[in-house]
Image (cartoon, coloured by chain):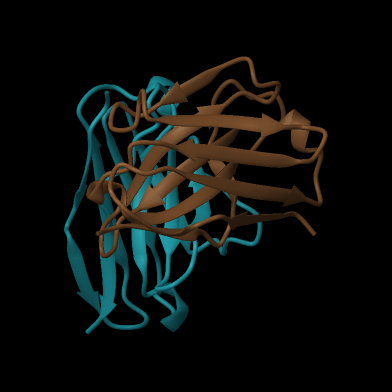
Chain colours: A cyan, B brown
Amino acid sequence: EIVLTQSPGTLSLSPGERATLSCRASQTVYNNYVAWYQQKPGQAPRLLIYGASNRATDVPDRFRDSGSGTDFTLTINRLEPEDFAVYYCQQYGSSPRTFGQGTKVEMK
Amino acid sequence: QVQLVESGGGVVQPGRSLRLSCAASGFTFNNYGMHWVRQAPGRGLEWVAFLWYDGTNKIYADSVKGRFTISRDNSKNTLSLQMNSLRAEDTAVYYCARDMRVFSPTDAFDIWGLGTMVTVST
């Protein structure tokens, strides 16, 4: 099973700043099949990014993904008020499809 | 409108059973792999089970293997999760989720339901 470790646990930033979220895998993720999800309180997760930097439908281009192998990064440029949430990475290159423990982006 | 709606959650005693359902609409259900994902209160996401689009391939997390059974009725556009021998640690919101592409061997989850809460307690 691939273990995903996200860092930091919490990121305190102001609107307009850049957020950089890290996701490190315990072994190489096949085909860089990593996805990122956003979850707000009381809501279901929402798919943001999937496999090699593809943004899901209606996801603004301020959300960018990078990385390969075992190290992946989600960057949110110019944080908007609606971006403050918890973000999870997931690998779907091998079974079971594991999630990281999440990074909370909170307003400073 | 593409939609997943879970039902069947509730409060149940340890050792008892519960069956969750997920009603799909707005897409061709029998073309997609489906999953159950859970989230314990205040915790992160945990993938629980997967079922291939035609029901031929099932995979479970170790934490539920032998206790939970995933199934689907493609004629009714419904995904189910039969949960037996429930434990306190199974307390969570249970989401059903869809693989993003048709007939995909593996994929991200692009559609999620709102979830149904399961509480295992005396």
Question: How many circles with numbers are drawn on the protein?
Answer: 0
Q: Nearer the viewer, residue A80 or A40?
A: A40
Up-down: is A1 above or below B39?
A: above
Q: Residue furthest top?
A: B56
- The reply, left or right, for residue A92 in relation to residue A56 is left
The residue lying at 36 percent from left, 23 percent from top is: B66
Counting from the top left corner in percent of width and height, residue B47 is at 39, 39
Up-down: is A85 above or below A7?
A: below
Q: Which of A6 and B6 is in front in this view?
A: B6
Counting from the top left corner in percent of width and height, residue A77 is at 40, 67
The residue lying at 42 percent from left, 70 percent from top is: A40
* Res A29 → quadrant: top left
The quadrant of the image that shows the C terminus of chain B is bottom left
Counting from the top left corner in percent of width and height, residue A45 is at 47, 58
- The reply, left or right, for residue A13 in relation to residue B80 is left
Counting from the top left corner in percent of width and height, residue A82 is at 46, 78
The residue lying at 76 percent from left, 31 percent from top is: B30
- The reply, left or right, for residue B89 in relation to residue A34 is left
Residue B99 visible? The answer is: no
Q: Which of B23 and B97 is in front in this view?
A: B23
Up-down: is A12 above or below B39?
A: below
The quadrant of the image that shows the N terminus of chain B is bottom right
Residue A95 visible? The answer is: yes
The residue lying at 70 percent from left, 41 percent from top is: B78
Up-down: is B33 above or below A103?
A: above
